[in-house]
Structures are given as structure tokens and as C-alpha cells.
Amino acid sequence: LAELDAAGIPYTWTDDIMSKLWRKLAINCAINPLSVLHDCRNGELLAHRAQLHDLCNELGGLLRACNQGDAADGLEDEVLRVIAATADNYSSMHQDVRSGRRTEVGFLLGQACRAAHQQDLATPELCGLLERLQAFLRRHGLPAD
């Protein structure tokens, strides 16, 4: 931790790592796929606020269904903060697509949709986004899993 302090990198200790991991999954599910499908930098996603809102609502419901209510609280606000903080960046998934590399689609949206299915939770926006992204990847000759 001294090395993080010396580098000026902020950190916090948590006893609930699962909540943090679920939260990160949800944020990445909201930002990364949309940046690919809209072919834009993160900041440009603000032009798609309704879509972000619907995704965050579904992701929040999924987190709650998976007993991760803390991860769901304030999710949309945090997604918007991350978008603002990284406005000039292309998401890692967007960069992977541009470079012709395998994306994290299976680990992000795939995991979220599998979890929703296990919870018998309808997530038409989320799983529809997965289907659209997979079709996009196939059209571009990239693995869609």
C-alpha cells in the first residue's frame, strides 16, 4: 500500500469485494457495449441517455436480484460520473474491436444475461444489447462469445 501512496493512487479497503466486482461489471455493461455499437468515445454516450437509463434500471434490478443491493444503489449516477471522467476515452471494448481483438462480451454482457436467466429476471434491454453486439462482432469477423 505504501507504493500506491507514493504513486498518489487512491485506494480503499473493503471486506465486500463481491459488491465491488458486481458494480464494476454493471458499469462496464452500461458503457462498453454502447461505445462499440455507437462507435464513439465514452463522453458521446451522453447523447444516448434514455438507453443508458434503461440499461442501468435493468442492471440495478439484476444486482438486487443477485443480493447485491449495495452495488445497485446509485448505479446510474456512477455510470454518468465514469462517462464524464473518461469522456475523451474509447472504452477497452471499443479499442479491442478497432484492433480486431476478442472482446470481453462473454465476460460482461454474457455473464449478466446468464445471471438474469438464473434469477428468472426479464432483462430485454440488456440481453437485446448482447444480441446486437454479438451480431455486430460477427459482421466484423470477430468472435462473439
Image: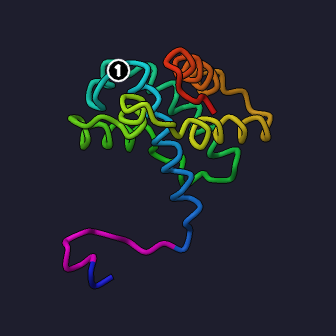
Residue 118: % across, % down: 79, 40
Q: Nearer the viewer, residue 42 or 101?
A: 101
Report the side of 130 relative to 82 (left or right). Answer: right
**Residue 11 belongs to magenta span:** yes
Which residue reaches farthest bottom? 2
Report the side of 139 relative to 68 (left or right). Answer: left
* Residue designated by label 1: 39
Residue in the image at 25% along x and 69% along y:
9
> Dot 1: what SS?
loop
Quadrant where the N terminus sits is: bottom left
Residue in the image at 51% along x and 59% along y:
20
Q: How many numbered tags mark residues here?
A: 1
Q: Main secondary structure of the magenta part?
A: loop
Quadrant where the C terminus sits is: top right
Residue 99: % across, % down: 37, 33
**Residue 23 belongs to magenta span:** no
Report the side of 69 relative to 9 (left or right). Answer: right
Residue 77: % across, % down: 38, 40
Residue in the image at 80% along x and 34% along y:
120
The quarter of the displayed image where residue 109 is located: top right
Span of residues in magenta: 4-14
Q: Nearer the viewer, residue 145 or 40?
A: 145
Which residue reaches farthest top? 139
